[in-house]
């Protein structure tokens, strides 16, 4: 079989490259080329020709300057989405870990509950999401209407409760954080289903013998969690954080804005600049967060 | 649910909680009952948060116009009607659109499984120069938001060409937009919707399989491709099933690429759903958004049904598959 010129290792390397060839072509054509073009677009004024082609004239950083300093909404939307992400992430991670532990224990009707928790994955498309939001508002709206009625009659309302909490000496930022989370609980629960799956898988991969050993040594449930469960799933926390950030940005308003600017206003340059800015910001966040988490992570192998 | 039930529950649930310290049994039992009640409340509450809007949508889809404006109607319609479903059926052109959509997502999923498993296998089992860097690039494709490449890709398919060959022969480029070809092409080259993630899943899975399988096959005289198609791909069924479910669901729900390539709405159910309200207001002359929304609710119920069925059929394999597929590793 061997034909002189190549060693076996070189042959295997060639076969390996052959296996990844489709992806490599796609990566070069669709990703590398597009990235370069996007940067080029963002640095120039793009004119769309009658034939459907385009012509670029280099204008330096003016698109970036416009997006950051002059555009009416871009700044605000970007900052808001970033703030929302940073607020939601810790909660999504804790919530999904908590639910994973709950769903991993054996109880009657567990498979049904699991199905319910994975449902949000199925309902991710635009129209469905919009209507879901509407339906959610119907439900919440019902509740808040009720509260309004009650508050008129009983002189109680939520803001009064918040004042009480504030007077108790709780820091305002904490109260803001909690009320913000409560008002977005629907979105958060819906956004954590894939994370729950990943954590469940992680929990199942912990060898049972560890727990048995801990039990024999007399560890309490609390200790078992912090000394066994948490360290063992900690590598997956990074995965989940990354997934959460990425997933958040797929549906964020920044994308919608960039899309709108490109295809309703036909301002390719500006849209490309917006995409580039937001991508750079996301990548920065990812880099910082993963650097922070990796330091604390425990790797079993 | 009475207390004895809950206690039975608990005893099954957690052996972990039993301590070595000596505490009175009654205290322990009270604690366990409280704990399981607490768990029950949380699970029921969270399930309601997820299911509440869905139930609302489904029940609303049976509302008649008079129910919408009746403040005493909540969840259960007074005069239930199938009118909304009929309207949604015609405006979605349900069976035909569903058929096309199914063909589309199933074929895309098959391509995804084939290509991504191949690439994953290549990364898992072969040594070649720059392997680490290239795999880093796979991770980049997972992490990079798709909108950063949308304009060049749009232009690319607007004037599609292979190294200028087509232009040289026919004198003009091909416009691939308004059809599903761009998605097929991108998937075929391993850069479709979330392909990077699937490559990653397959790579992790293949790394977990023992090398002896392939060695045995090689000794028995199977070539590398034969080994891959006949042996490794079959062994990768758990990973393939989770990829299949993810791919089908996400492809079905995808709006980003559908909108970007302006795919024909007659062949994409979820995409069509996004325009159904405008269609109904225009064609059926129902100008009241509250009432045209009812048909949208019915449409959503219709759109969710097929994917729910797929999910329920595959859900057992799906959860198992994820647990075994090594997303975790």
Image: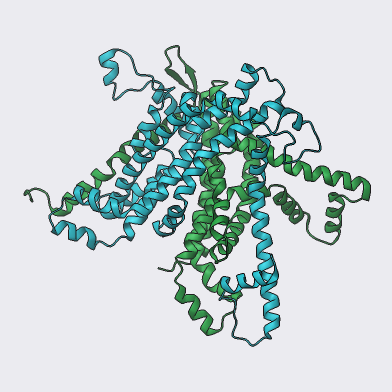
Chain colours: A green, B cyan
Number of on-image labels: 0
Q: Residue A283 in the image: x percent, y percent?
A: 51, 45
Q: Can residue B90 be seen at all in this image of the molecule?
A: yes
Q: Does residue B268 lie above or below B199 as drawn?
A: above
The image position of residue A41, as x and y in percent, is: 47, 27
B162, above or below A205, in the image? above
| Residue drawn at (61%, 59%) of the image | A94
Residue B229 % position (x, y): 24, 48
The extreme bottom residue here reads B22
Which residue lies at the image location 51% right of the left edge and 60% below the top edge? A200
Would residue A86 be seen by someone viewing this image from the given angle? no
Q: Quadrant location of residue A81?
A: top right
Front residue of this view, candidates B57 and B77: B77
Q: Based on the displayed image, in which of its 4 quarters is residue B238 positioned?
A: bottom left
In the drawing, does residue B73 fall left or right of residue A120?
A: right
Quarter of the image with the N terminus of chain B in it? bottom right
Where does the image place residue B296, in percent across and percent down from the top left?
Answer: 62, 30
Question: On the rendered image, what quadrant is the C terminus of chain B found in?
Answer: bottom left
Specify whether A116 is left or right of A162: left
Quadrant in the rendering for residue B157: top left
Toward the viewer: B277 or B291?
B291
Q: Tell whether B197 sits left or right of B224.
A: right
Horizontal side of A24 relative to B37 (left or right) equals left
A4 vs A15, nearest the viewer: A15
């Amino acid at each position: 079989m061997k034909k002189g010129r190549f060693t076996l290792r070189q042959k295997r390397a060639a076969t390996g490259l052959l296996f990844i060839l489709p992806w490599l072509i796609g990566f070069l054509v669709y990703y590398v080329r597009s990235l370069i073009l996007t940067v080029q677009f963002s640095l120039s004024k793009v004119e769309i020709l009658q034939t459907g082609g385009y012509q670029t004239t280099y204008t330096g950083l003016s698109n970036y300057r416009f997006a950051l300093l002059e555009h009416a909404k871009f700044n605000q939307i970007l900052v808001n989405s970033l703030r929302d992400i940073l607020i939601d992430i810790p909660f999504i991670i804790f919530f999904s870990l908590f639910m994973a532990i709950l769903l991993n224990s054996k109880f009657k009707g567990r498979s049904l509950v699991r199905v319910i928790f994975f449902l949000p994955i199925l309902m991710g498309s635009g129209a469905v999401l919009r209507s879901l939001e509407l339906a959610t508002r119907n439900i919440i709206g019902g509740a808040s209407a009720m509260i309004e009625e009650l508050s008129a009659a009983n002189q109680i309302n939520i803001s009064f409760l918040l004042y009480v909490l504030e007077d108790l000496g709780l820091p305002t930022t904490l109260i803001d954080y909690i009320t913000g989370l409560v008002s977005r609980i629907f979105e958060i629960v819906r956004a954590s289903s894939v994370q729950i799956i990943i954590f469940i898988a992680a929990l199942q991969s912990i060898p049972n013998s560890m727990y048995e050993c801990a039990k024999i040594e007399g560890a309490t449930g609390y200790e078992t969690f912090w000394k066994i469960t948490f360290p063992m799933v900690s590598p997956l926390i990074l995965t989940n954080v990354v997934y959460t950030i990425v997933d958040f940005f797929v549906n964020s308003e920044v994308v919608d804005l960039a899309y709108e600017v490109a295809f309703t206003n036909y301002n390719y340059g500006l849209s490309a600049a917006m995409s580039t800015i937001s991508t750079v910001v996301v990548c920065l966040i990812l880099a910082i967060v993963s650097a922070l988490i990796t330091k604390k992570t425990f790797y079993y192998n | 649910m009475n207390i004895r039930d809950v206690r039975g529950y608990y005893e099954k649930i957690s052996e972990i909680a039993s301590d070595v310290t000596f505490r009175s049994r009654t205290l322990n039992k009270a604690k366990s009952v409280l704990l399981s009640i607490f768990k029950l409340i949380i699970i029921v509450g969270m399930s309601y948060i997820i299911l509440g809007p869905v139930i609302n949508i489904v029940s609303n889809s049976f509302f008649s116009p008079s129910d919408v404006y009746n403040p005493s109607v909540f969840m259960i319609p007074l005069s239930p009607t199938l009118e909304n479903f009929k309207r949604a059926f015609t405006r979605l052109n349900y069976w035909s659109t569903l058929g096309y959509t199914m063909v589309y997502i199933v074929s895309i999923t098959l391509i995804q499984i084939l290509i991504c498993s191949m690439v994953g296998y290549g990364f898992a089992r072969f040594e070649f120069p720059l392997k680490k860097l290239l795999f880093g690039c796979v991770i980049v494709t997972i992490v990079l938001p798709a909108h950063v490449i949308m304009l060049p890709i749009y232009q690319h398919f607007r004037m599609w060409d292979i190294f200028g060959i087509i232009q040289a022969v026919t004198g003009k480029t091909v416009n691939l937009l308004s059809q599903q070809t761009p998605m097929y092409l991108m998937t075929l080259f391993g850069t479709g919707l979330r392909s990077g993630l699937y490559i990653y899943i397959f790579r992790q899975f293949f790394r977990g399989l023992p090398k002896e399988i392939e060695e045995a096959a090689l000794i028995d005289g199977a070539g590398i491709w034969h080994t891959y198609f006949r042996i490794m791909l079959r062994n990768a069924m758990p990973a393939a099933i989770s990829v299949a479910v993810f791919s089908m669901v996400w492809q079905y729900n995808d709006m980003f690429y559908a909108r970007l390539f302006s795919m024909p709405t007659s062949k994409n159910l979820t995409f069509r759903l996004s325009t159904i309200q405008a269609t109904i207001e225009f064609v059926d002359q129902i100008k009241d958004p509250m009432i045209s929304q009812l048909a949208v609710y019915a449409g959503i119920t219709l759109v969710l049904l097929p994917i729910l069925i797929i999910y329920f059929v595959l859900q057992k394999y799906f959860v198992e598959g994820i647990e075994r597929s090594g997303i975790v590793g």
